[in-house]
Image (tube, rainbow, N blue to C red):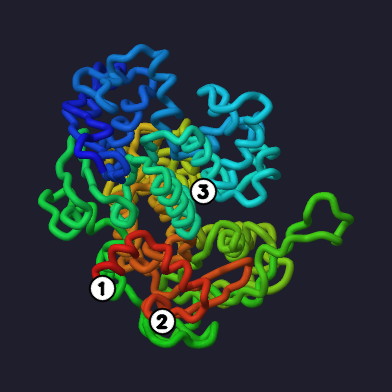
Amino acid sequence: MSDEPLLDIRGLRVSYRTRSGLVPAVRGVDLTVGPGEVVAVVGESGSGKSTVAHSVMGLLPAGGAREAGQILFDGVDLALVKDKELRARRGRDIGLIPQDPMVSLNPVQRIGTQVAEVLLIHGLADRDTAAAQAVEILGQAGLPDPGVRARQYPHELSGGMRQRVLIAIAVAARPRLVIADEPTSALDVTVQRQILDHVESLTRESGTAVLLITHDLGVAADRAQRIVVMAQGEVVETGSTRQVLDAPRHGHTGQLLSAAPSLAGGRLVTERRRAAAPSGASAVVAPVGTRGAGGATDLVIARNLVKDFPLPGGTRGARTLRAVDDVSFGIGRGETFALVGESGSGKSTTARLVVRLADPSEGDVTFDGQDITRLRGGALRRLRRRMQIVYQSPYASLDPRQSVAEVIVEPLRAFGVGSRGERAQRASGLLDRVSLPASVLRRRPSELSGGQRQRVAIARALALEPDLVVCDEPVSALDVSAQSQILELLVDLQRDLGLSYLFISHDLAVVRQIAHRVGVMRHGRLIETGPTDDIFAAPTDPYTKELLAAIPGGRRVASAT
């Protein structure tokens, strides 16, 4: 690599104009990226890392403005060039892989057209050759059957495929720098590894530099040569990956390290988990229906669950998709049982069968000794009080028109529990239970951070004092610090209230910190189950081994040993 940096940011200051005045987002940031170098900018949501990336591209959102500093690319200050020159550099000299492909891709244009557009804009192909080159680039980005994918629309592709399309667009013009802004945060760990492997391969072959924006130090540990740690708009630490991870100098870096599930090695809530574990939960798994605290039967028993969905285009009953295939497990009282697998593995559908939000095609579910498989009417409604769900996205699961107080008391009102005053008092107590101040009651969800919103969702789930809480990817939409806080909260609530959890996740690093037992799902089947420590220490199925190998931070662990 050249001694001269390809990207040299000096004293960058960026603010956003709001109704209450200017809000500083980036406060005097300095960072460099050398030719062919991979530099990771790491920080929590709101740290300013994405604002730095958008400043380089000249793509700050409305209200955002650079107030000071230089953004030197190959010696040219991008902050001073005219819009026309900046547009010419986007894609040609600097590529961007954004976070959300559903927002970033045009839903009414075919995939091939969107890739070809980059070539046409920068004069790298003509109308006769652009389409064929686009198919070739899609193939290089790792899409299977690129000719077919080029004719499809974004909604016809999986999340991983859509992200590969964004990679294809970013590298189509062979830029000298690629900015990857949280490119895999919404993907399963195995798909995440594939995407990052492919970015690494493409950029290494062409000598392209990468500025990787991420909240996950595990990802940075695997992929970057240098790490820049940001907090509250400032760079608090920078150095080689080994130096930052092995000997962090700033307290915030240490906090990020301890909060990163893949690097914490089970340390985050291990002691809490052991304290909360029901008797026998870490022992060899007993047959379904015979295990539980103090020898009691399981709270939930799922036996031979099957769920078939009809496929369009077939005659009645002729074509079906088997989403859940002969799945059996139990959940003890006060126990966390985690179902792990990639998107489409059947884990969320299984959870819906357990809480009777869907009816099984075959099999049965027993809850607290009662067969609930065919409950209807009032009996099913009464069951709802004892089962609650915390969903993946706190942004989507809370009504934006309601105050936090209204969100929390809604289940109480629906079941006619308590007077208005008693419900209000209950809401205040629930907020205290999830470590939020009473002042939050008057606010709306949009005024809260992602972690605060998820705490509100948990408070709502606890309102009816359930026995079972289904946590469906409850931390996948949060940065690692918020993840850590929510996981600690869930374990503390379990210890204090005796809750049972069915924990749905694609991330084994997260599961390791909270679950007593794990079931691994693939293609609708439960392929391996056992105590969490056993699954991690000695997995028996090749797919489980693949999931474990895909946990971010594995390269660092391997190199250290």
Q: Residue at x 49, y 74 (%)?
A: 331
Q: Considering only order in the chain, which callout, 1 or 2, is on the residue closer to the N terminus?
A: 2
Q: Considering only order in the chain, which callout, 3 or 2, is on the residue closer to the N terminus?
A: 3
Q: Work out which residue is located at the far right of the displayed protein and give it.
A: 315
Left or right for 327, reference 467: right
Label 1 secondary element: loop
Residue 544: % across, % down: 49, 72
Left or right for 220, reference 343: left
**170 lies above or below 142:** above
Q: Residue at x 39, y 48 (%)?
A: 204
Residue closer to the observer: 559 or 55: 559
**Which quadrant would residue 522 be assigned to in this image?**
bottom right
Instruction: Check disc 3 and report the residue beneath it.
Output: 416
Instruction: Check disc 1 and report the residue beneath it.
Output: 561
In the image, which disc is placed on residue 538?
2
Residue 351: % across, % down: 56, 62
**239 lies above or below 92:** below
Between marks 2 and 1, how big is the CA–CA gap?
18 Å
Between marks 2 and 3, how big is the CA–CA gap?
49 Å
